[in-house]
């Protein structure tokens, strides 16, 4: 078990290093609102092929697909916000388990959105009120630890690939829409 955890950690570290050192240096991205961003598609396919190569060289067979699907969903959600003009930081991919419960940070003007991404199937697992409250608490703690965000207009979005919220989680979000929203972004498979 510890070997699998270490291997998963090592895999994420390798992905981050490979991504940072193999991407071409270029000017800051500017997004045109005329459709799909070709720069994202090229970068996404490039990083996906790097990750696939790394996965094929590891022995984490049980978690390999789960980790890759989670990362792909974070890229997918990030692309959604980039296409709306946000600059997205892939906080979860960059920091792994030390992401402090925040997968993406999207900035545009004076607005910052903290995003949690869940690419769970409809296999009986549900996102419950405790998941939602934990994310909300994580964002407050993150802002407390990073006071530069206190001057921004903060939003929090819990992004899911399937409608798998429990009734209590849905009710909690509905009653706290000023603090938190959810968004269903179904990823094409």
Image: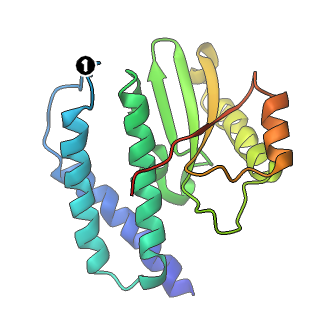
Q: Residue at x 75, y 21 (%)?
A: 178
- Residue beneath the point at 49% across and 86% down: 3
Quarter of the picture holding the N terminus: bottom right
Residue 179 lies in quadrant = top right
What colour scheme does the image use?
A: rainbow
- Counting from the top left corner in percent of width and height, residue 69 is at 43, 62
84 vs 140, left or right, is: left
Q: Quadrant of the C terminus?
A: bottom left
- Percent x, y of residue 76: 40, 45
- The residue located at (64%, 69%) in the rendering is 123
According to the picture, the residue beneath numbered tag 1 turns out to be 32
Mark 1 surroundings: few (<14), some (14-19) or many (≥20) residues within 10 A: few
Between 3 and 72, the one nearer to me in the picture: 72
Which corner quadrant of the image does residue 65 belong to?
Answer: bottom left
Q: Nearer the viewer, residue 54 or 166?
A: 166
In the image shown, does 30 or 187 lie closer to the viewer? 187
- Residue 69 in the image: above or below residue 85: below
Q: Position of residue 47 (x, y in %)?
A: 25, 54
Q: Name which quarter of the figure residue 38 lies in.
A: top left
How many numbered discs, if any?
1
Q: Who's the residue at 27% across and 22% down the image?
A: 31
Element class at badge 1: loop
The residue closer to the viewer here, 75 or 91, is: 75
Judge left or right: residue 80 versus residue 16: right
Q: Is residue 124 left or right of residue 31?
A: right
């Amino acid at each position: 078990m510890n070997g699998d955890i270490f291997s998963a950690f090592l895999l994420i570290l390798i992905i981050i290093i490979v991504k940072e050192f193999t991407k071409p240096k270029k000017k800051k991205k500017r997004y045109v609102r005329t459709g799909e961003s070709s720069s994202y598609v090229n970068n996404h396919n490039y990083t996906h092929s790097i990750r696939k190569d790394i996965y094929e060289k590891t022995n984490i067979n049980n978690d390999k697909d789960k980790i890759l699907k989670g990362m792909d969903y974070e890229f997918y959600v990030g692309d959604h916000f980039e296409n709306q003009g946000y600059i997205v930081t892939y906080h979860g991919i960059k920091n792994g388990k030390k992401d402090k419960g925040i997968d993406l940070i999207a900035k545009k003007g004076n607005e910052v959105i903290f995003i949690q991404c869940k690419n769970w199937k409809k296999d009986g697992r549900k996102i419950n009120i405790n998941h939602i409250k934990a994310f909300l608490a994580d964002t407050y703690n993150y802002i407390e630890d990073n006071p530069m965000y206190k001057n921004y207009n903060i939003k929090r979005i819990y992004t899911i690939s399937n409608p798998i919220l429990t009734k209590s989680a849905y009710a909690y979000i509905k009653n706290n829409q000023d603090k938190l929203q959810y968004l269903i972004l179904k990823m094409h498979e």
